[in-house]
Image (tube, coloured by chain):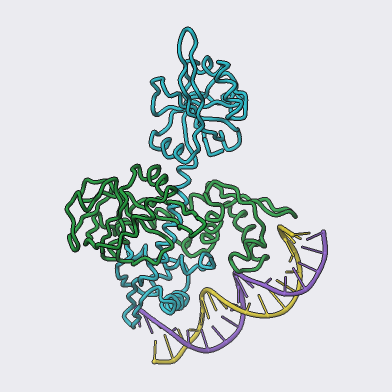
Chain colours: A green, B cyan, C yellow, D purple
Amino acid sequence: MTLFLKDDTQFLFFLAVQSDGVHSVLKTSTAKISKELEISQQTVSRKLRELKRDGLISMDASPSGCSISLTSDGIELLRLQFFALQKLFQQNKNRVLQGKVKIGLGEGRYYISRPFYLKQFKNLLGFKPFFGTLNLEVEQAELAGFVSALPSIEISGFETDERSFGKIRAFKVLVEGKQPAAILFPERTAHKKNEVEIIASINLRKKFGLNEGNKVRVSRA
Amino acid sequence: MTLFLKDDTQFLFFLAVQSDGVHSVLKTSTAKISKELEISQQTVSRKLRELKRDGLISMDASPSGCSISLTSDGIELLRLQFFALQKLFQQNKNRVLQGKVKIGLGEGRYYISRPFYLKQFKNLLGFKPFFGTLNLEVEQAELAGFVSALPSIEISGFETDERSFGKIRAFKVLVEGKQPAAILFPERTAHKKNEVEIIASINLRKKFGLNEGNKVRVSRA
DNA sequence: ATTACTAAGTTCCGAGTAC
DNA sequence: TGTACTCGGAACTTAGTAA
């Protein structure tokens, strides 16, 4: 249990995030890390040596920098934490999300049809979306509980001459228990926290005859 | 970023686990927590007050004990960590493919050595393959996730007087993290969906001392 | 440029105790 | 039983450097 209080875990976590994967090798320097974390280069140096001593990372330091990778013990420590958090958020999960239809201004139509997004929707979600979103008003807490139980899918952003399109976090779901669809969370845009956008291969509003205020049931895919 | 180093996060994590859920109220005492974490009652008391001051928990302390619950900010902090870990482990799943060696009948040897294929392997994959394939048994879903993230390379088919050789879809990969290789999907032949063929410039089975049933790690090139 | 040692400065912890 | 204050010593961090 004491494990939980050691901030070594948090340091390890940071390294894994920096490596952008738990199996990668991170080429960096103590100075770089120290700037990111806003602690001294000396402390980083010491902490890395401690993690190495404790068998959580392997590290080679030289006058040209250091390369770091997590050992299987280190990965296991993070995985334990992951499982604990998963249990925490999933047990508390709602298997179903209730929402009320909001007729929006149709902005969704535009960004969904951008080719760079479209391609990813097809690859990562498994369908070519209808060019329009179904907007649902939901309980914020319920939404959080619902999506926390689902694997998140990342749709990359991109830039054009005129503007940039941010990353989108997506979750595969079923609408009314049967229609495959996806909840989208655009990361940049100032998004109302109690509203979600849903896309599917077909026109959801038409298929289910939905009007402003109608209730919709979204469940796990 | 500094967030990562604050062990407050770990303390918060502990409290959530103790509450057995992120929305519950934990009735306890500083002494109880101090025993679990093997730190002093005084430190627990102080840390709780700090978390309260920072808006991560709400807490009421009295001579009869204390009751603690996470605030939405506190829950959000844990959720962020959960998402980051999820991404870390989830993405890693798609970056690495685990397979088990299947010793086949050596049919691969034949078609790989056809000059029309050979030429394309050299041009498109960047190596002249060893005349033999390494067959791996894999999880079908894992395989799908793995290759979907890779650019696919198309090797054209051709015909001889006797028979025709179909297109091959290929993906550049690394075997055991270092050996450049390629996964091949012959398009025509009735291919088991949970088996892949891998070629490299050298004899993979020999280089890595592989026998039937041995585990092999394939990662992105 | 690096890493990492030493020494000094700072923060943190917990025993004793008040309430 | 509780929580939480004080304060001395332990632990940690970092500036200055060496290599």
The answer to whether one can see residue B123 in this image is yes
The vertical placement of D12 against A62, above or below, is below
Judging depth in this view, the residue of D11 and A96 nearest the camera is A96
The answer to which quarter of the image holds residue A136 is bottom left
Q: Position of residue D12 (x, y in %)?
A: 60, 69
Judging depth in this view, the residue of B106 and A88 nearest the camera is B106
Which residue is rendered at x = 37% and y = 67% of the image?
B75
Quadrant location, the N terminus of chain A: bottom left
Q: Classify residue A92 as left or right of residue D8.
A: left
Q: Position of residue B32 (x, y in %)?
A: 38, 71
Judging depth in this view, the residue of A28 and B148 nearest the camera is B148
Q: Position of residue B86 (x, y in %)?
A: 43, 53
Which residue is rendered at x = 49% and y = 20% of the image?
B157
The vertical placement of A39 against A158, above or below, is below
Which residue is rendered at x = 44% and y = 28% of the image?
B137
The answer to whether one can see residue B41 in this image is no
Q: Position of residue A38 (x, y in %)?
A: 60, 69
